[in-house]
Amino acid sequence: DSGVTQTPKHLITATGQRVTLRCSPRSGDLSVYWYQQSLDQGLQFLIQYYNGEERAKGNILERFSAQQFPDLHSELNLSSLELGDSALYFCASSVNLGRGPNNEQFFGPGTRLTVL
Amino acid sequence: DAKTTQPPSMDCAEGRAANLPCNHSTISGNEYVYWYRQIHSQGPQYIIHGLKNNETNEMASLIITEDRKSSTLILPHATLRDTAVYYCIVSPIPWGGSEKLVFGKGTKLTVNP
């Protein structure tokens, strides 16, 4: 158990719909990352937040957005869903911005999204 | 794009050492080598990291060549639970920046009884 929690574990929805994935980082971790894992693209970085502020963006679509709240939990919002958005979505957390090498990321169990 | 090259798959007998190679010939001086693994669709798990010296922890050992262009992850006594995809990642020391992880395709290690 990494200490990172994600809800829901599974989500089945239809094309065109909007969903919200939730992540609670490990206690004390200020950075939250979102990754998408699909069969054809592998694990891809989407976005990072640090203490409520966006720090880095990766291959995140405009239909997707995220935020980190004052209690440090984060939500990933996916809208106008398409079949190709079906994937595993992982959240990870780390202690800080990485001012040093010992800043491994701890991953949650993921949310499996199926778009029908 | 991932800056590492790993064999797509490897097999290992239970109880034997598993040696997983990784090439990172374009690694620069400020980049660390990290290893993560993913057991069947679970979240990736950190294993070990190093800069230029060999490293060991309770999970594994990391051997980095002197020129730092390649490394080997060693699981000293592989068990069936070590069956997973192992990812080798190079990442710079994130002084104030993002430390996003760029995953390649990894090596699928199968430990056989």
Image: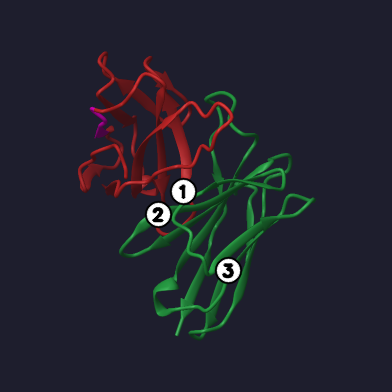
Q: Is residue B9 above or below residue B92?
A: below
Q: Is residue A99 or residue B78 the one in the foreground?
A: A99
Residue B80 seen in the current view: yes
User: Residue under circle 1?
Assistant: B44
Question: Is mark 2 in CB contact (under 8 Å) with mark 1?
Answer: yes
The residue lying at 26 percent from left, 18 percent from top is B65
Residue A64 location (% of width, % of height): 54, 66
Secondary element at image label 3: loop
Can you tell which of label 2 and label 3 is closer to the viewer? 2
- Label 3 chain ID: A
Q: Left or right: where does residue A6 sit relative to residue B18?
A: right
User: Residue under circle 3?
Assistant: A9
Q: Is residue B81 or residue B4 the one in the foreground?
A: B4
Distance between the alpha carbons at the discs numbered 1 and 3: 16 Å
Chain B's shade in the image?
A: red
Residue A30 location (% of width, % of height): 69, 41
Residue A3 location (% of width, % of height): 65, 48
Crowding near the residue tagged with mark 1, few <14, some 14–19, many ≥20 C-alpha atoms within 10 Å: many
Secondary element at image label 1: loop
Q: Specify start and end residues of the magenta stretch as a single range.
A: B20-25
The chain that appears green in the image is A
Q: Earlier in the sequence, mark 2 or mark 3?
A: 3
Identify the image quadrant of residue B61: top left
Distance between the alpha carbons at the discs numbered 2 and 1: 10 Å
- Magenta run includes residue B108: no
Query: Tag count in the figure?
Result: 3
Q: Is residue A31 or residue A61 the one in the foreground?
A: A61
- Label 1 chain ID: B
Q: Left or right: where does residue B38 sit relative to residue B108?
A: right
Mark number for residue A43? 2
